[in-house]
Amino acid sequence: MNERGVALILVLLVMMTLSALSMSLAVMVSTESRVAANYRDGIEVLYGAEAALERVLPDLAAESDLSAVLTGLTLSAFIDGPAGVRQMPDGTFTDLRALTSMVNCGRPVCSDVDLDEVRDDRPWGQNNPRWQLYAYGHLSALGAGPSSSLGASGSRAYVVVWVADDPSETDTDPLTDGGGEENPGRGRLAVRAHGYGPNGTRRVIEATVAVGDPGFSVLSWREIR
């Protein structure tokens, strides 16, 4: 009886150990799957932001009055209707107008004082960029998209592009493309593209573009973390 009792205890211990190992393995596999999915989603929305930025360059090149772009009077052909509330790929709802204010001053609504506030990321005061919505829509609407495994037609990403006066201008008027040939920012624009994906994934690209021959050329490009 004693030997049988000891054997039973040993069997139970082995079963408990195997159960613990199985649970640990399941958690590890689940974690790795989530990490891989987040990485995939991050790459998809990053490529989406890049594709959206490239998509708007021909539209900007066709604009006869850059100041109309800077005041929000003209938009890209790539829009999915009037600006308002949109459902993002993660199921949440976002108001594009409030999102624009968040990009500008970090608040749902911006005053002129907020927009001219000197901060680490906006050190130009009255020359701070005043971002205007220019393009927005589902990446799949682009037709030909980034070189991801899904391609644009199967992408779940939603992309938004804003345009602003280049902060190198010296005219203290961010709603006008700088007057005077001597203005270093004349003919230059700042462009910011956001890509949104599942599970709250977001990637941001900011670029400086300039009027060239032909069209606009990209002078600088960076991903904002």
Image: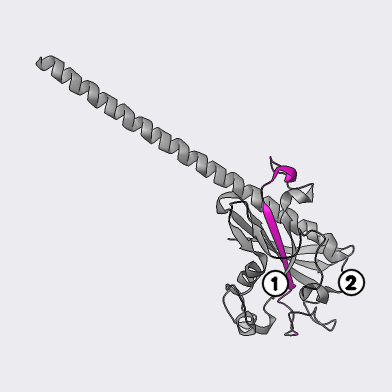
The answer to whether residue 187 is seen in the rendering is: no
Q: Is residue 47 left or right of residue 1?
A: right
Q: Report helix, strand or loop for mark 2.
A: loop
- Separation of marks 1 and 2 at Cα, in angstroms: 19 Å
The part of the chain drawn in magenta is 148-171
Say above or below: 219 vs 71.
above
Q: Does the stretch in magenta take in 155?
A: yes
Task: Indicate the quadrant containing the C terminus: top left, top right, bottom left or bottom right.
Answer: bottom right
Residue type at mark 2: give it: Ser
Give the residue at mark 1: 131
* Residue 56 in the image, given as x and y percentages of width and height: 79, 60
* Whether residue 99 can be seen here: yes
Q: Is residue 77 magenta?
A: no
Task: Using the rendered view, name the quadrant where residue 178 is placed.
Answer: bottom right
Badge 2, how many Cα within 10 Å: few under 14, some, many 20+? Answer: few
> Foreground: 225 or 27?
27
| Residue at image location 54% in from the left, 42% down from the top | 36
